Image: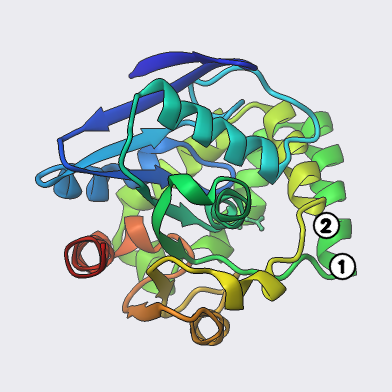
Amino acid sequence: MQTVSLDHGQLAFVQQGTGLPVVLVHGFPFDHRMWQHPLATLAADAHVVVPDLRGFGSSSGLADPLTMSQLADDLAQLVAALEISQPICLVGLSMGGYIAFEFWRRHRKLLGGLVLCDTKAETDTPQALQNRHRMAEHVLAYGTELVAQAMLPNLVAAETVSQQPRVMELLRTMIVETGVETIAAAQRGMALRQDATSWLAEIDVPTLVVAGENDQLTPAAAMHAMAQSIPDAEFVSVPAAGHMAPLENPAVVTDAIRQHLVRRM
Ligand code: MLT
């Protein structure tokens, strides 16, 4: 991995290929490895940059709470540090999508297109907020193994559990290797995020919305409705996939992103 010094610390990232700049932003609590398949394929005709967000993977400089606006600003600094002058296509999964909404709001001039993958615009219900704060306390007290146990069953489609042991192992590894302070800080940061629902009608870049057909956390029907609220959006449903569609069915997700880049950007 390469690193770049930003205001807050060192940000680690991988980059591959040349052409249209595409930044792939991981979800919670993962790192750049969740994008391994799209990275390899998209880099054939794009400049693909895949960071470990602040505090995750090999990146330092954790803040608590870790807010979506801080993480969006980090991405803008990364784009500047890499001297990328063309507007980027920002691809975000789940928490990466929350960051993508903030990036659109705060750094519109840097943005040429969006891919919102297995994410949502709404903030949390009172119950979900409570769960975030509970996980923040529990991970600090008991460690990441419990987080993996709690999260894994809801992350993927049933067929992924039974047929893709390597995907399950990678997901588990990424979760247990994430620092306990990072998990707590990111939960507190996500709890503070703004509701992006009212922004959807104003999103003025070509947008692709990608949903795992069996996503239990951000259901495909809700994502379809979200796509209909964005003026220039297309929707793709990914078969045999849950919330982690880019790992579960990478061919369909990568092809949808490629077509978005070629036809609409
Ligand atoms: C993610 O995959 O990034 C999480 O599901 C986001 C969240 O906890 O809301």
The three-letter amino acid code for the residue at tag 2 is Asn
Answer whether residue 53 is visible to the viewer in this image: no
Can you give x and y, in whole percent of width and height, for residue 203 in the image?
53, 69
Q: Residues within 10 Å of mark 1 (few under 14, many from 20)?
A: few
Q: Is residue 6 left or right of residue 246?
A: right
Looking at the image, the residue that sits furthest to the left is 44
Q: Which residue is mark 2?
A: 131
Residue drawn 58% across the image and 83% down it: 222
The quarter in which the C terminus is drawn is bottom left
Q: Which residue is mark 1?
A: 127
Residue drawn 48% across the image and 81% down it: 231
- Is 176 located above or below residue 245 in the figure? above
Instruction: Give the SS element for disc 1.
Output: helix
Can you give x and y, in whole percent of width and height, for residue 80 in the image?
43, 27
Residue drawn 56% across the image and 29% down it: 56
The three-letter amino acid code for the residue at tag 1 is Gln
Which label is found at residue 259?
none
Report the colour scheme.
Answer: rainbow
Q: Is residue 27 left or right of residue 240?
A: right
Mark 2 near mark 1, Cβ–Cβ under 8 Å?
Answer: yes
Instruction: Give the SS element for disc 2.
Output: helix
The quarter in which the N terminus is drawn is top left
Can you give x and y, in whole percent of width and height, for residue 92 in the image?
47, 54
